[in-house]
Amino acid sequence: MGGNGFSYRIVRGEPEEVISKLADLIMELADESVGSKGIFKCALAGGSTPAPLYRLLSARFVHWENTIFFPTDERFVPLDDPRSNYRMIRENLGESARIRRINTELTPETACEDFANSLSDFGALDFALLGIGEDGHTASLFPGKDCRKCGESACITEGPDGLLRISMSYTALVGAKIIAFLVLGEKKEQALRRVIKGDLTLPAARIRGRKQTFIFTDLPL
């Protein structure tokens, strides 16, 4: 199901059911990656929607030593700021997670370059979890706004709140083997429908995994 000849694999259900199935997918991919090459490289979305998923993974995930987690993006705020994606991921995923955070104590340019280098050092992602905003943005890639690259894998942009943000670039995200969008709540229905129809003016519609792209949602499609 999808526009421009592209097909999404859509998983629908109530929020708790959807989150449980998404956790199962992540653990299955981790098993496969660790078993075949000894490492699982996983990007995680920020915001409030995936917090219950991360709490579930904190209790069920087993490959902590062999998994590297990356935030897909970060607001340029201190680590202890409530708006920090790193803080949200860490608090919900737990202390066992190895997270390559974005160093917001540096200048934006230096932090972006550092993040881009870290992503390049580890190579292509095995899995990336993304959300979709009401405006169709994903990570910190916003419609109608440039994201100034500081390497192949990361870029700097400004969010609607006026905060500078550092984001994985389109290049980094479309390099992921598997992409999953987690989209919950009726406010996002219009944007999701446009993404599925292939409206490439929306950043989320331009992100597709090399092997497969999932949408996990509670919305009627």
Image: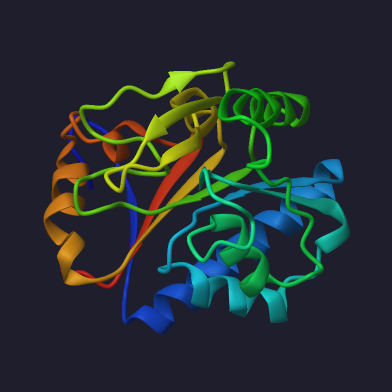
- Vertical placement of residue 35 versus 170, above or below: below
| Relative depth, front residue between 82 and 118 | 82
Q: Quadrant of the C terminus?
A: bottom left
**Residue 212, x across and y down, in percent:** 46, 42
- Vertical placement of residue 189 versus 161, above or below: below
Q: Quadrant of residue 108?
A: top right
Residue in view at x 27 percent, y 37 percent? 205
| Relative depth, front residue between 126 and 36 | 126
User: What number of labels is visible?
Assistant: 0
Residue in view at x 16 percent, y 61 percent? 189
**Residue 217, x across and y down, in percent:** 31, 66
**Residue 171, x across and y down, in percent:** 50, 23
Q: Quadrant of residue 59?
A: bottom right
Q: How is the image coloured?
A: rainbow
- Vertical placement of residue 166 versus 29, above or below: above
**Residue 200, x across and y down, in percent:** 20, 29
- Residue 51 horizontal side relative to residue 160, left or right: right
Residue in view at x 32 percent, y 82 percent? 14
Residue in view at x 20 percent, y 54 percent? 134
| Relative depth, front residue between 78 and 131 | 78
